[in-house]
Amino acid sequence: MPPTTPLRRPAAYFEQTSQSRVSGTLVFVAHLIVDLAAVFSIVWLLFRQIDNPPAGLQSELFSQLVGLAVFGAIVYAIAWLLVSALMHVLSGGSGTDGTFWDAMDVAGWAYAPEIVTAPLLLALAWNSIRGLTLDGSDPQRLVAQLETLESAAHHPVSLLVVAIVVAWSVYILAKGTAATHDVSTDKTLPPAIIVGIGAFLFALV
């Protein structure tokens, strides 16, 4: 079965009893790597737009990014476990044919839409950044300029892409969990929507 099947037909994919239930972990790890690479890329692009950057700014930025990467990996892992637990418990838990590990596999695949759309979001960020000229001679002014860039994250196109990603992930969660736990989507859709709302609100922060 083609590797894109979980993105198009999650129910058919997860109904296969031969599934090893490790592919979702690989997708989650890939999502983490892609997200961290995107953050590093955006910071690098921003730094290139700064005229007269303060001494030591580059090393300070990337030093903080390393710490952020470690913290981010922990937060992402906790979020993955929480989403898996929510989907498993609210879909019937031990009263179904599915296990928590099944829920983790499905939840891992639910991050795949973010990987697919990452190049587009990075291109939108680059388009917002490339025309900027940031003044590094005045640290306070530089901070103020960087703070105004937060509005770029709420660009209508970016928000539309995020909404599509969230809807796609909800679809994978609902259909995939219904297949692994052998329950109807009426039972898996509500917790999937809860996860989707949380993901969308988190993206707005």
Image (cartoon, rainbow, N blue to C red):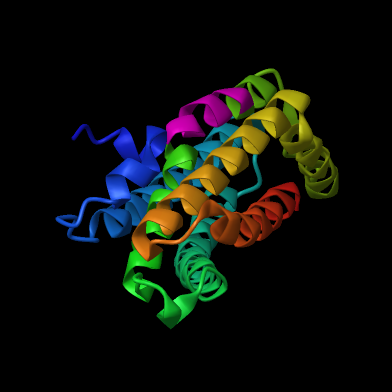
Q: Residue at x 47, y 61 (%)?
A: 69
Q: Left of 203 or right of it: where is 45?
A: left
Residue 25 horizontal side relative to residue 88, left or right: left
Q: Is residue 135 magenta?
A: no
Between 150 and 79, the residue placed more toward the observer is: 79
* Residue 49: percent from left, percent from top: 63, 28
Q: Which residue, as the protein is rendered here, is positioned at the far left?
A: 18
Does residue 52 appear in the picture of this structure? no
Please state the horizontal and vertical placement of residue 135, each as a whole percent of the image.
76, 33
Q: Quadrant of residue 130?
A: top right
Most foreground residue, 165 or 8: 8
Residue 159 in view of the camera: yes
Queried whether the magenta region covers residue 123, the answer comes back as yes
Q: Residue at x 67, y 59 (%)?
A: 194
Q: Up-down: is 123 above or below 4? A: above
Residue visible at 30% across and 59% down? 25
Q: Residue at x 69, y 24 (%)?
A: 128
Q: Which residues are magenta?
A: 116-124
> Is 95 situated above or below 201?
below
- Furthest residue toward bottom: 94
Task: Report whether 6 appears left or right of 39.
Answer: left
What is the total number of numbered labels drawn onto the structure image?
0
Q: What is the x, y in percent for residue 124? A: 62, 24
Residue closer to the observer: 178 or 65 = 178
Say above or below: 165 vs 70. Answer: above
Magenta segment, prevailing SS (helix, strand or loop): helix
Task: Name the image quarter holding residue 19.
Answer: bottom left
Q: Position of residue 131 (x, y in %)?
A: 69, 18
Which quarter of the rendered picture does the N terminus lie within? top left
Query: Foreground residue, 137 or 191?
Result: 191
